Image: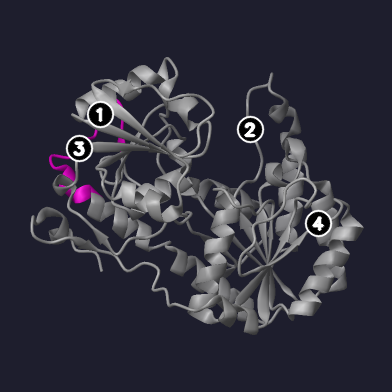
């Protein structure tokens, strides 16, 4: 349990029991019949947002409910071989609706699946975010197997941009695909309030059919988090390749440097693969680049940081895996480049800071407690429990 006292006390550390994981061997996983089929765009050996989310979800489902997952992957082996681990992988051979429907039907039959979990993110399945083959295939599959529960996890709905961007003109078609996929689903889970609003408008639903659960951390949920002032004066920069452009390139780099100076940061720990070199300094702080790391090592570095920098839409922080990683580790997020209104139960000055600092609390020591309390409501265990419950519901035909 979280204790606010634990953050302020120099002798006590913050306790967090978010995953309640039990240890089961890979052999155990192979002896249990898969019960849930997850459909993902990609599933590879390096860090990858939705693929990592689905894998952690599979582990939690198995450890908490005994449900084993099998994966259908929307990318063929010729393009990108899938990761080899304890779970069954079935990559698509060709992206056509009929072929995909048959493949999904076969996997559901062979595994005696209780439910199918479809991870919806258009750009992951097709260039320009228009996977019509996926929609067509899911429609055909639904007619072939009407008794299997379908759960949609809506990571993305549709793009929105300025008129001179192609995504502006593609948005109506993307919206159509997301809406029709949602109409096929028995239940839906999405990561933020804005997406939930669209899904609720698109079809009549009951309250129990749609849940909002911000994403969980893909790099772990530590049991112990040190009080803020017992950690070094370090700030993390974490994320996939390309995040360095959003934080180290002008004019944003000037804001990033100002943040580091204002917080008296001595060292910036840059974590992840990078396509361009990182600067040796950010303001007065030395930048140390770790390159790509395992989730365990990322967690270790985050536990030694007070703050985490990110350039992300404040109105959609619930869908940010980087924000989730910071929150689960009690790392105070510093948001730059967005003036949006926060949603998903987040409050500026309570769960994150925004540069320039306008709503800074008198003491920052309470913020790690607030973050972890917020995060506990949608930990990986919470996600797994919701899906396990839905998967056992009998579908009304």
Can you give x and y, in whole percent of width and height, for residue 81 in the image? 72, 52
- Is residue 92 visible from the viewing direction of this image? yes
Camera-side residue: 61 or 284? Answer: 284
Circles 3 and 4, Cβ within 8 Å, touching? The answer is no
Question: Which tag, 3 or 4, sits closer to the chain's start?
Answer: 4
Q: CA distance from mark 4 to mark 1?
A: 48 Å
Task: Tell me the number on the disc at residue 357.
Answer: 1
Task: Give the residues in magenta.
Answer: 353-367
Q: Determine whether 166 is above or below 22 in the image.
A: above
Q: CA distance from mark 3 to mark 4?
A: 47 Å
Question: Which tag, 2 or 4, sits closer to the chain's start?
Answer: 4
Q: CA distance from mark 3 to mark 1?
A: 18 Å
Q: Can you say which quadrant of the picture contains the N terminus?
A: bottom left
Q: Secondary structure at mark 4?
A: loop
Q: Does 364 appear in magenta?
A: yes
Q: Secondary structure at mark 2?
A: loop
Q: Can you say which quadrant of the picture contains the C terminus?
A: bottom right
Q: Quadrant of residue 89?
A: bottom right
Instruction: Considering the whole magenta stretch, tell me its main secondary structure.
Output: loop
Q: Quadrant of residue 150?
A: bottom right
Residue position marked by numbered label 3 in the rendering: 233
Can you give x and y, in whole percent of width and height, for residue 362 in the image? 13, 39
Camera-side residue: 144 or 198? Answer: 144
User: Does 379 sit left or right of 397 as displayed?
Assistant: left
Question: Which tag, 3 or 1, sits closer to the chain's start?
Answer: 3
Q: CA distance from mark 1 to mark 2?
A: 29 Å
Task: Tell me the number on the disc at residue 92.
Answer: 4
User: Does 261 sit left or right of 280 as displayed?
Assistant: left
Q: Mark 4 or 1, which is nearer the eye? A: 4
Residue at horizontal 58%, vertical 80%? 27
Q: Determine whether 173 is above or below 55 in the image.
A: above
């Amino acid at each position: 349990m979280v204790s606010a006292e634990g953050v302020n006390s120099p002798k006590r550390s913050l306790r967090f029991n978010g995953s309640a994981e039990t240890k089961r061997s890979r052999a155990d996983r192979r002896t249990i019949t898969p019960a849930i089929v997850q459909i993902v765009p990609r599933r590879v050996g390096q860090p990858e947002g939705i693929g990592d989310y689905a894998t952690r979800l599979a582990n939690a489902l198995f450890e908490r409910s005994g449900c084993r997952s099998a994966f259908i992957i929307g990318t063929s082996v010729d393009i990108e071989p899938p990761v080899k681990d304890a779970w069954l992988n079935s990559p698509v051979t060709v992206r056509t609706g009929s072929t995909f429907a048959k493949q999904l039907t076969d996997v559901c039959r062979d595994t005696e699946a209780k439910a199918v979990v479809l991870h919806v993110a258009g750009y992951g399945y097709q260039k320009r975010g228009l996977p019509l083959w996926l929609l067509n295939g899911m429609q055909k599959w639904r007619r072939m197997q009407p008794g299997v529960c379908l759960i949609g996890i809506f990571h993305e709905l549709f793009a929105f941009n300025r008129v001179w961007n192609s995504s502006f003109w593609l948005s109506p078609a993307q919206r159509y695909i997301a809406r029709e996929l949602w109409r096929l689903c028995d239940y839906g889970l999405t990561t933020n309030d804005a997406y939930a609003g669209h899904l609720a408008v698109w079809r009549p639903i009951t309250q129990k059919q749609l849940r909002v659960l911000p994403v969980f951390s893909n790099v772990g949920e530590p049991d112990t988090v040190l009080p803020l002032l017992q950690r070094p004066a370090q700030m993390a920069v974490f994320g996939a390749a390309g995040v360095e452009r959003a934080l180290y390139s002008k004019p944003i780099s000037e804001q990033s440097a100002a943040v580091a100076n204002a917080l008296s940061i001595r060292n910036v720990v840059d974590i992840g693969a990078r396509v361009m070199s990182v600067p040796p300094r950010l303001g007065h702080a030395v930048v140390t680049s770790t390159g790509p790391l395992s989730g365990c090592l990322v967690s270790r570095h985050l536990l030694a940081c007070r703050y985490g920098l990110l350039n992300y839409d404040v109105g959609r922080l619930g869908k940010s895996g980087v924000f989730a990683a910071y929150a689960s580790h009690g790392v105070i997020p510093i948001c730059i480049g967005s003036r949006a209104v926060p949603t998903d139960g987040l409050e500026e000055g309570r769960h994150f800071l925004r540069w320039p600092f306008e709503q800074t609390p008198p003491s920052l020591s309470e913020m790690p407690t607030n973050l972890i309390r917020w995060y506990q409501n949608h930990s990986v265990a919470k996600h797994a429990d919701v899906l396990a419950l839905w998967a056992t519901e009998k579908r009304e035909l």
